[in-house]
Image (spheres, grey):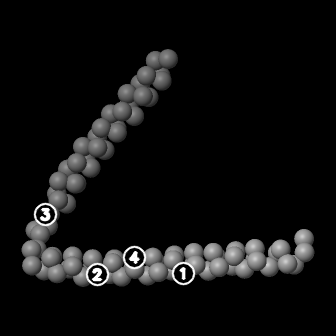
């Protein structure tokens, strides 16, 4: 391949690569700005309209106890079935 045909193709490839990199860089920069701006808006909204957080620790411990009992029953049933077989 001679250089007269190669150089225009190389130049076009470099232009496309650089334009693509520039577009991606601009997009990522704008995306970061939008994320930061959204964070500011959400903080402002949370200050103006606070949401009450429910305390669910007591419910979770009861549910965990029930889950533990269910697991124990399932294991006992599986062992009982295995000993019969």
Side (left or right) of 84 relative to 50: right
Return the residue nearer the eye: 72 or 23: 23
- Closest to the camera, between mark 1 and mark 2, is 1
Pointer 1 or 2: first along the chain = 1
Pointer 4 or 3: first along the chain = 4
Task: Name the spot of residue 43 as percent of width and height, x first.
Answer: 20, 79
Return the residue nearer the eye: 68 or 22: 22
Task: Name the spot of residue 30 as percent of width and height, x first.
Answer: 40, 80
Please say if the residues under marks 2 and 4 sit with CB atoms less than 8 Å apart. no
Q: CA distance from mark 1 to mark 2?
A: 23 Å
Depicted 68 relative to depicted 35: above or below: above
- Closest to the camera, between mark 1 and mark 3, is 1
Task: Name the spot of residue 82 as percent of width and height, x first.
Answer: 48, 24
Judge the density around disc 3: few (<14), some (14-19), many (≥20) Cα neighbours within 10 Å: few
The local secondary structure at tag 3 comes to loop
Q: CA distance from mark 4 to mark 3?
A: 34 Å
Labelled disc at residue 37: 2
Pointer 2 or 4: first along the chain = 4
Pointer 1 or 3: first along the chain = 1
- The residue shown at (15%, 76%) is 46
Task: Name the spot of residue 4 as percent of width and height, x first.
Answer: 85, 78
Labelled disc at residue 54: 3
- The residue shown at (43%, 22%) is 81
Judge the density around disc 4: few (<14), some (14-19), many (≥20) Cα neighbours within 10 Å: few
Q: Which residue is mark 4?
A: 31
- Closest to the camera, between mark 4 and mark 1, is 1
Labelled disc at residue 22: 1
Depicted 14 relative to depicted 69: above or below: below
How many marks on residues? 4
Please say if the residues under marks 2 and 3 sit with CB atoms less than 8 Å apart. no
Can you tell which quarter of the image residue 57 is in?
bottom left
């Amino acid at each position: 391949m001679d250089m007269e045909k190669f150089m225009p193709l190389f130049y076009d490839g470099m232009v496309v690569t650089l334009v693509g990199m520039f577009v991606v860089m601009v997009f990522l920069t704008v995306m970061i700005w939008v994320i930061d701006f959204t964070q500011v808006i959400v903080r402002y909204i949370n200050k103006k309209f606070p949401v009450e957080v429910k305390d669910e620790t007591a419910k979770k411990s009861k549910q965990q106890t029930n889950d533990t009992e269910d697991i124990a029953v399932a294991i006992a049933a599986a062992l009982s079935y295995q000993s019969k077989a």
